[in-house]
Image (tube, helix red, strand yellow):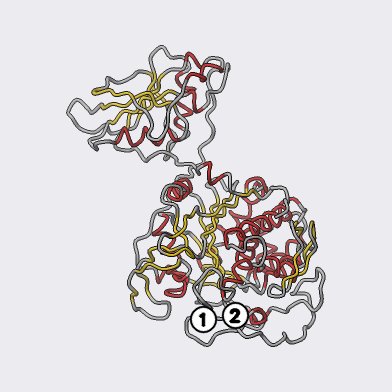
Amino acid sequence: MSNHRSGGVQDRLVAPTSPGFRSSRRAAASAPPPPPPPREPRGRRSGDDGRKKLSGLAWTSIALTGLVVAGSLTGYTFYRTALAGIVTNDPGTKIINPRPANATGALNVLIVGSDTRHGEGNARYGQADSRIDSGKRTDTMILMHISPTRDKAQLISFPRDSMVQIPQCEAEKSKTVLPATRDMINSAYNRGGIACTITTIETLTGIRIDHNVEVDFNGFKAIVDELEGIEVCLNNAVDDKKSKLKLPRGRSTLNGEQALGYVRLRAYGNGSDLERIKRQQLFASQVVKKITTGGVLSNPTKLLGLIQAASSSVTMDKKLADDPNRLLEIAQSARSLTASKVQFYMVPVLADPTDSNRVIWDPARAPKLFEALKNDTALPEPAPTAKKFVPKVEQVKIQVINGTTTPGKAGEVAQQLAELGFDVVGTGNALTAAGTSQPKTLLLYGKRDTTGPDYASVLASKLSGTKRPSTRGKVKVTNPQPFTAAGTTQTVADKGADKGAEKAPVIQLLIGDDFTGVRTEIPESIKETGISADTKNICA
């Protein structure tokens, strides 16, 4: 790891000397921290309070840092001095596995927080362990996905208890190649540092990680204090000695020290990690709302203090830290990053059938979440040529035609389109006269269908890759078949309720060799459990 500054992160951090909303960077001096309590065994079970008790702190620290890094550099020349001393790393030199491509122009930043107890400030919340692997597990991993147009951000949380296949990784401090293994996802950091964590996420999701940010927990309180507190709401009063938190039932505005206790709180509700993550998402959503709507971004003094508080606890990849153009690009795009366009999700999970204290990723829903991020091409909504009405997805009738020599392609694509809500009426085949694959994918409508372009444009907006124009005239289909989506019963009787729907043309989707797929969307079951940054501060 390279370092742009002479001292380490801990050298420049000073803990607040009293309650209230004073920044740690402004405190003149502080008393030595109290002796750390004996550390409980690390353990591997969900009920352990050893290393897991910092996962809440990690989650929220990361969310705060991610938004500051991605959304606060609006005055680049002025604020660059606040980031000049940031610690950097270079994980790309340690990644030995093939990496996926980023074909959409989106920006994917992996933000991680370690459960380290080393360092003066961190030691207050648990005793550091002398073992080699101590403090090397990532209790928190979040993928921050910023859209190609930089006008929305989605933060995806990976539960630390997820049992996954970790690929082979190069050891962090040597050239030794460690074999692949099945383990908890947070153990990747222990095996090969941030490089192994990146390659694990890339292998599991197929999403290219463009940059990474690592968070040190000492800066968490300073960030909250710089924001002059964050409001939370509790269904029940709290008096918890382990998290050092005492709060009444109802709404409270927390300073940095109290916020630290809140995000570490475990003995509340049903005590589960997943429930705690949901509370932390609510907390983070209030932070984002305050940053984007509370005048922080327009106040140079507040913004500078927030950046300094965040940069004191952040390590980022050298490529990002040393790229003023990329930082400026993010800064400029942040102006349109409103609270309503910042969404928090968690990878959907199921109980691990081999261990009730662990989880596995839902094989039906998780891949669709990852595909939605990979295919985020941010195509504009279709503009109808006819002015009578705007076609809805469910009004668009489609015949999916396999123009390639790959068997079953039409049925596969038809199922995907049906899951998006399209009325897929049939499938078929249409190779070239020479019996070879069609070179290009086409959207076709009848010669007399005056509204054909309107309906075709709705379909085009759901296909990945470049925007495809529609063409008048259809192809002759061989082996036409009716289609009913698997696991569904298509009902189209109510689609004539909208004016003009009864005249909807059938659009032919002719799949050619250049077909890049359907734009997978985040499943509604995941959207329903997600949180927007402008979510009302509900009690939990």
Quarter of the view holding residue 327: bottom right
**Label whose residue precedes the other's in the sequence (2 or 1):** 2
Q: Residues within 10 Å of mark 1 (few under 14, many from 20)?
A: some
Q: Which residue is mark 1?
A: 134
- Counting the numbered discs, the total is 2
Q: Quadrant of residue 220?
A: bottom right
- Tell me the number on the disc at residue 417: none
Q: Residue furthest left?
A: 434
User: Does residue 199 appear to the left or right of 229 in the view shown?
Assistant: left
- Circle 1: element type: loop
The amino acid sitting under disc 1 is Ser
- The one of 357 and 327 positioned closer to us in this rendering: 357
Q: Are marks 2 and 1 in contact (CB under 8 Å)?
A: yes
**Distance (Cα) linking label 2 and label 1:** 8 Å
Instruction: Classify 482 as above or below 323.
Output: above
Q: Which quarter of the rendered picture does the C terminus lie within?
A: bottom right
**Mark 2 = which residue?**
117
- Determine the residue positioned at 57% across, 59% down: 274
Tell me residue 254's x, y (percent): 77, 64
The secondary element bearing badge 2 is classed as loop
Q: Quadrant of residue 203?
A: bottom left
Residue 25 as seen in the image, left or right of residue 66: right
Residue at (22, 27) in percent of width and height: 432
- What residue do we see at 58% from left, 50% from top? 153
